[in-house]
Amino acid sequence: MLPLTLLNTSQGHPMLVELKSGETLNGHLVNCDAWMNLTLKEVVQTNSDGTRFFRLPECYVRGNNIKYLRVPDEVLDIAREKNQQQREEQRKSSQPQRGGYNRQYSSSGQRGGFNRNRGGGNVGRGGGQFQRGGRGTKY
Amino acid sequence: MSGLAQYVGKAVVVITSDGRLFTGILQGYDQTTNIILESAKERVITPDAPTEVLDLGLYLLRGESVALCGLVDDEIDSQIDWDKVRGLRLGETKKLGL
């Protein structure tokens, strides 16, 4: 599983973020992105000695300042389930298109030129990036 | 084969750039060496006290803070009496230049 998948799944869950400076932030993850930038709400900030505490209603953390995140154990299970569901949906959505010969032509209403016949790229082949390796593809 | 792929699902030890030592099960990683550690534990090794083990749970380590990730040999690891292990605190690593 990808770390950022886990992070995405953590949205809405409480977490502890330690920054490179040693400060920690305890709060609920509101949002995150591919750079690990975060927004947290209901935050308790602790200085690096752990001697002072500050309460912030909300804060934004630029990803590059993060050392690590501590997330609740159950988030991993939730993320695994989500992954599994997505895989199944991809498998299902690819099946009707496998015999999708007709689709390509009927939808266009034309005989279709050069590109059109070949085209459809992924659509016609029913291929997402995960299709090639069949069911057992890991990612 | 090289890279972290071969460690996925196995017990690993991670040393971070601030000199801390974590163990856990590697559940995932990415191009920037962000690491998912399941059942993460921190081993605090000090010169004059038994090794302290902190149970931390699920951790996501940012790649920049990872200095080392190694596969744990369970057989050897089980032979180590961590209570008797003493050692100095590891130093930090420093990034020079950009």
Image (cartoon, coloured by chain):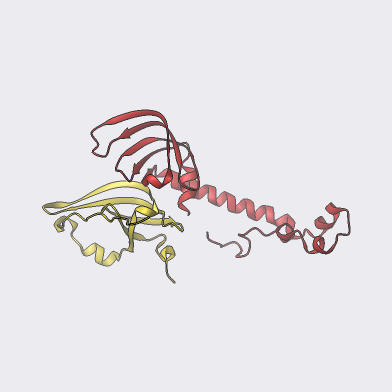
Chain colours: A red, B yellow
At 26% from the left and 39% from the top, the residue drawn is: A48
Q: Seen in the image, is B51 located left or right of residue A84?
A: left
- Near-viewer residue (A74 or A51): A51
Q: Residue furthest bottom?
A: B1
Rendering coords of residue A125 (x, y %): 72, 61
* Figure check: B90 above or below A61: below
Rendering coords of residue A90 (x, y %): 63, 53
* Figure check: A70 above or below A130: above
Q: Is residue B36 visible?
A: no
At 38% from the left and 45% from the top, the residue drawn is: A65
Q: Seen in the image, is A103 located left or right of residue B67?
A: right
* Figure check: B2 above or below B83: below
At 42% from the left and 55% from the top, the residue drawn is: B27
Q: Seen in the image, is A122 located left or right of residue B31?
A: right
- Near-viewer residue (B69 or B76): B69
Tag count: 0
Rendering coords of residue B74 (x, y %): 29, 64
Q: Is residue B27 visible?
A: yes
Q: Residue furthest front?
A: B97
Q: Seen in the image, is A3 located left or right of residue B84?
A: right
Rendering coords of residue B36 (x, y %): 40, 52
- Near-viewer residue (A44 or B83): A44
